[in-house]
Image: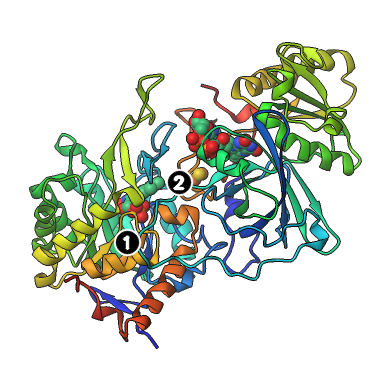
Amino acid sequence: MSSSQNTQSLAEPRARGVFTACVLSNDPLCPKHYRIRLGMKNFPPSHPGQFVNIQCTGCRGRGVCDHADAQALTWSQTPRPRHPTGPETIGRIPLLRRPFSLAGRRDMTDGTVELDILYRVVGPGTNWLCQRKTGDEIDLLGPLGNGFAIREDKPLAAVIGGGTGIGPMIYLAESLSSAGRDVKAFAGARTVSALPLTEEQKGFFEITTDDGSLGQAGMVHEAFAQWLERDRTAEMVVYACGPEPMMKAVADICTPSGIECQLAMERHMACGMGVCQGCAIKVKTDEPPGWMFKLVCKDGPVFDAGELVWE
Amino acid sequence: MIDLSVDIAGVKLANPLMTASGTCGYADEYADFVDLSGLGAFVTKSITPAPRPGNDYPRIVETRAGLLNAIGLANIGLEAFCAEKIPLLERLGVPVFVNVAGASIAEYVSVIERLDDIEVVSGVELNISCPNVAEGGIQFGTDREQVAKITAAARKACRNKILIVKLSPNVTDITAPARAAVESGADALSLVNTFSAMVIDIETRKPVLANRTGGLSGPAIRPIAVYMVHRVWTEVAKDAGVPIIGMGGLQSTRDAIEFLLAGATGLAVGTATFVNPACLTEIRDGIAEYLEAHNHSSITEIIGTVR
Ligand SMILES: Cc1cc2nc3c(=O)[nH]c(=O)nc-3n(C[C@H](O)[C@H](O)[C@H](O)COP(=O)(O)OP(=O)(O)OC[C@H]3O[C@@H](n4cnc5c(N)ncnc54)[C@H](O)[C@@H]3O)c2cc1C
Ligand SMILES: Cc1cc2nc3c(=O)[nH]c(=O)nc-3n(C[C@H](O)[C@H](O)[C@H](O)COP(=O)(O)O)c2cc1C
Ligand code: FES
């Protein structure tokens, strides 16, 4: 999480870059949320909590790889499009890339990679994304940011996702489980029709809805607190992503009990690469005035709950 | 072979493409995405004498075809810059221009004096879109006399490097500060910086940015930037033999050619690199293709040739 580890020397292999991804599927999970599955010829190592920046504009033509089976993909040989020198066309809308957390990754035997992203349609960028069809190509930059820190010394992990924040928690829960660790997973949503989980995934999570339409009625941090009181058995680490009030509530449960709590934060971003200084977040320091700014895209998005200054 | 090299007041650039200050970091932040040794020059984030935390959040908001920012010159400060970033800049292998900012003339001078002995630095770019705190907060760049004063002071401090003055576009007549800068010793001009602007959230009825206002960049400002470059070129810079580094919404080869025709010798790209850092070298190659297709052997043949 320190900022210095991101300063890569020029000679080291590239840990991130711009990639062309092929849409394998793009299906609604509930009326507002979609899960898009992307096939990539290759992709650098990534960790739960990291994100990618998608260029939600233009279209790299359809039908270059119109099978949903990653093994059978034929990869487009067309180079990245050149900048046209002809008359000015309609402006790129949206202008900037949009950040999305990775919600899953599968590495295939032939070296290709499948990435999942779970997203909520809120504006022009996500609206563009939800219209992509199987076989469309997408321009993706990443992986960006730092993932959740895995604690070898803590046998139990609680994973808490709220709303769209459930996405990165699926990736985290999957990789913790496949590493043989004990995981307790919670997912919360306003109502059942806003819960972005597949039927299969629903079985893995302890579910709460505000209106009680599925699982326990109430907020997800309340379910977590009840479980903690009842069943907490071992030294544990807590991971959460969701709306800021939910993450603050989780932090307020963990901090007094001395439980380590890592949160994936969000800020509006222009670059995602640590150059624009747009995604500032306040963290505590010992020196006056007692806080400083860090960058969510480069120093985060995962922060230790104890480090954050809540506003 | 097409000759893309340009001369910025004696500094030889392999091609005109450079990074716009504040949009490409201090040194090698983009190294994973673009071959930085293929740039004409690297321009750093604004450096101030002491570190600055910058403005409160939110600092950025996207607008139609534009980006509004109020970063507040957040930077690591002169000492950390020299200790941590200069060694990285030395490895880039391209000329480096360090952008300098301050709240008083003395602050600018102190940064320039320190940079003047550092070998890898080829030039200093004065960001004069800062309020002069010592003189009641008037922006240096919007007042003719302030531009003259700060340029003259910087000129004295800047003995071994070229002096580039980066103009603020927030003026009625862009040729006035341009002329003041040239008459006071600027070796080159860069324009434009961002346009003062505001976005209001209609539900909360408050400005979106914590700073209330910010600077607009991106494709939305390009035609105004091209116009300003053209006016400064024809009315001030051409006769004075002062090259212009053109920027503002530059996004594609087409836009780059437009700036060159308007009178720019150098080209800087800011906001567009957030989407694709490699556009810096893609545009460079696109210019060569354009020149070849139009039977030119050197880029200098088209500079300022709008009919
Ligand atoms: C590190 C990170 C990870 C993210 N992961 C996901 C994810 O996995 N799934 C998902 O659906 N969304 C995620 N987001 C939020 C997502 O980036 C925004 O919803 C998206 O940019 C909106 O774009 P738009 O053009 O559709 O809407 P816009 O019109 O740009 O925005 C619509 C609404 O979304 C808000 N918004 C816009 N940009 C951001 C942003 N960068 N961060 C937060 N809110 C924003 C705006 O304030 C506005 O209310 C993430 C954001 C960050 C910073
Ligand atoms: C996020 C951001 C930060 C910037 N920071 C600086 C800065 O520190 N100093 C400076 O002189 N200009 C700064 N600029 C202005 C750019 O260098 C450039 O003049 C302007 O953005 C227009 O070019 P563009 O449309 O290609 O971005 C900044 C612009 C942006 C978008
Ligand atoms: S989004 Fe640009 S620095 Fe974080």
- In the rendered image, residue A87, in percent from the top left (x then y), is placed at 35, 63
User: Residue at 68% of width from left, 18% of height from top?
Assistant: A190
Image quarter for residue B67?
A: top left
Q: Residue B14, image x and y in percent?
A: 37, 78
Q: Secondary structure at mark 2?
A: loop
Q: Nearer the viewer, residue B162 or A143?
A: A143
Query: Label 2: few (<14), some or many (≥20) within 10 Å?
Result: some
Q: Chain of mark 2?
A: A
Beta carbon of the mark 1 residue lies under 8 A of ligand 2: no
Residue positioned 22% across, 64% down in the render: B163
For the point 26% across and 44% down, which residue is it?
Answer: B195
Expressed as whole percent of the image width and height from the top left, the position of residue B191 reads: 24, 57
Residue B296: quarter of image: bottom left
What residue is shown with label 1? B115
Residue at mark 2:
A93
Please tell me how crowded label 1 is: few (under 14), some (14-19), or many (20+) other residues with Cα within 10 Å.
many
**In the rendered structure, the residue with mark 1 lies on which chain?**
B
Amino acid carrying label 2: it is Ile
Foreground mark, 2 or 1?
Answer: 2
Left or right of A39? Residue A275 is left
Q: CA distance from mark 2 to mark 1?
A: 41 Å
| B271, A264: nearer the viewer | B271
Quadrant location of the N terminus of chain B in the rendered image: bottom left
Residue at point 88%, 13% (across, down) = A230
